[in-house]
Amino acid sequence: MNIAVYPGSFDPITNGHLDIIRRASRLYDKVVVGVLTNTSKRPMFEKSQRVDFIKRSTADLGNVEVAFFEGLLVDFLRKENAKVIIKGLRATSDFEYEFQMALVNKQLCPEVETVFLSSSEKFTYLSSSVVREIGRLGGDVSMFVPPEILGDVNRAMHGE
Ligand code: PNS
């Protein structure tokens, strides 16, 4: 079975992430979305909520699982029996950092491959931090996050 891991903070999941998950789910037998708390960022949403948001947004995708992980990404891949890391690239500015991470992960675990999917042109501007900023300032995030989680995201961000 060809298993891929799509890692990230997903604070919260955006339509850009969902597009990558959907496309990856057509390429691999199973996609495990690996949710972690980045040690250098304080998340807006609790990890259990971030996992729940992704589960609800991907409920129609039978070969997608969602799990929280801590520690090294390559250790999570070993645990999940996965050989592929999926990353979405929005622009060339993402490339340098992602290329470095791909090389580090290859060094840590040579049998792992990082596969880059180019983000859809509709979502090149989108990131979780943009969603958090707009939400914090009272803006409408309905075109940026999956409809299944919009109510909860709004409630968490401005108590609606
Ligand atoms: O959504 P993010 O916060 O940009 O995702 C970053 C993530 C989770 C992909 C990255 O922080 C990661 O892989 N962390 C796991 C720790 C690790 O394995 N580090 C070594 C590789 S540089």
Image: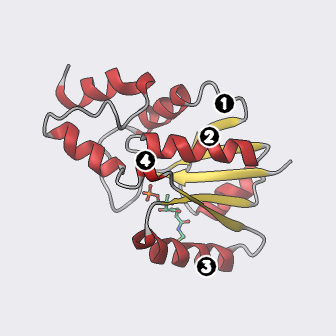
Q: Residue at x 21, y 46 (%)?
A: 133
Number of residues whose C-alpha sits closer than 10 Å to that of mark 3, classed few (under 14), some (14–19) or many (20 or more): some
Q: Residue at x 65, y 55 (%)?
A: 76
**Sequence-wise first label, 4 or 1:** 1
Q: Amino acid at mark 3?
A: Leu
Q: Secondary structure at mark 3?
A: helix
**Sequence-wise first label, 2 or 3:** 2
Q: Amino acid at mark 2?
A: Arg
**Sequence-wise first label, 3 or 4:** 3
Q: Is mark 3 within 8 Å of ligand 1?
A: no
Q: Which residue is mark 2?
A: 22
Q: Alpha-carbon distance for marks 2 and 3?
A: 25 Å
Q: Is residue 92 left or right of residue 40?
A: right
> In the rendering, which numbered label is found on residue 61?
1
**Sequence-wise first label, 4 or 2:** 2
Q: Secondary structure at mark 4?
A: helix
Q: Alpha-carbon distance for marks 4 and 2?
A: 15 Å
Number of residues whose C-alpha sits closer than 10 Å to that of mark 1, classed few (under 14), some (14–19) or many (20 or more): some
Residue 21 percent location from the top left of the image:
59, 43
- Residue 94 occupies quadrant: bottom left
Q: Nearer the viewer, residue 35 or 64?
A: 64
Between disc 3 and disc 1, the foreground one is 1
Q: Which residue is mark 3?
A: 103
